Image (tube, helix red, strand yellow):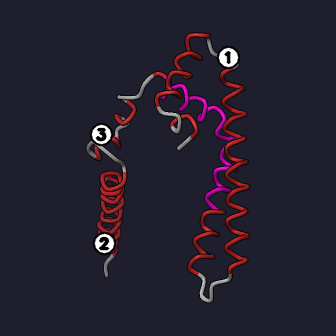
């Protein structure tokens, strides 16, 4: 194969790979991302309809992500361990019990990390912002707990 045709083959294959990657992102966003078109969500329009308290919770989470991320990863790993214990052949009951106990522990630690971040952030809020956050927690209690 000559140098020019080899270069073009590499360019075409690279272009195809990028196109498949972008198509995969858009399709997965459409399939798993909820309402709206994939392009809207890809462009960040998913935040357009958020309430002020939604934005406050997102800011709290983003500001404290470094402290929260390890506990979220622990919950993810514990969930995987539960799935593996369930799918194990032969089934080992104690392995499932241990995995579920680890999931419970990591979930509680994750909630504690989020609550600590929330308390720290609420400390800096105005009374009006705290009232709005309280009203949102009454409207949809799970939303402020990360559910």
Which SS class for mark 2? helix
Marks 1 and 2, Cα distance to the nearest angstrom? 58 Å
Q: Write down the residue under mark 2.
A: 9
Residue on which the image places disc 1: 124
What span is in magenta?
A: 53-77
- Circle 3 residue: 40
Q: Is residue 59 magenta?
A: yes
Q: Which of the two labelled residues, at mark 2 and mark 3, occupies the earlier sequence position?
A: 2
Q: Nearer the viewer, mark 3 or mark 1?
A: 1
Q: Where, by quadrant of the figure, is residue 119 drawn?
A: top right
Q: Quadrant of the N terminus?
A: bottom left
Rendered residue at 72%/33% (across/down): 116
For this rendering, which residue is in front, 135 or 115? 135
In the image, farthest residue toward the top: 127
Of the two numbered discs 1 and 2 in the rendering, the one whose residue sits closer to the viewer:
1
Please name the residue shown 64% across and 39% down the image: 65
């Amino acid at each position: 194969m000559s140098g020019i045709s080899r270069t073009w083959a590499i360019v075409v294959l690279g272009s195809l790979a990028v196109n498949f990657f972008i198509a995969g992102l858009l399709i997965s966003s459409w399939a798993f991302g909820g309402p709206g078109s994939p392009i809207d969500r890809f462009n960040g329009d998913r935040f357009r309809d958020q309430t002020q308290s939604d934005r406050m919770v997102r800011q709290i989470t983003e500001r404290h992500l470094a402290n929260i991320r390890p506990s979220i990863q622990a919950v993810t790993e514990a969930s995987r361990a539960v799935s593996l214990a369930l799918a194990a052949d032969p089934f080992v009951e104690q392995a499932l019990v241990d995995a579920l106990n680890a999931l419970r522990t990591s979930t509680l630690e994750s909630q504690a990390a989020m609550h600590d971040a929330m308390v720290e952030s609420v400390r800096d809020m105005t009374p009006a912002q705290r009232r709005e956050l309280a009203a949102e927690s009454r409207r949809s209690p799970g939303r402020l707990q990360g559910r």
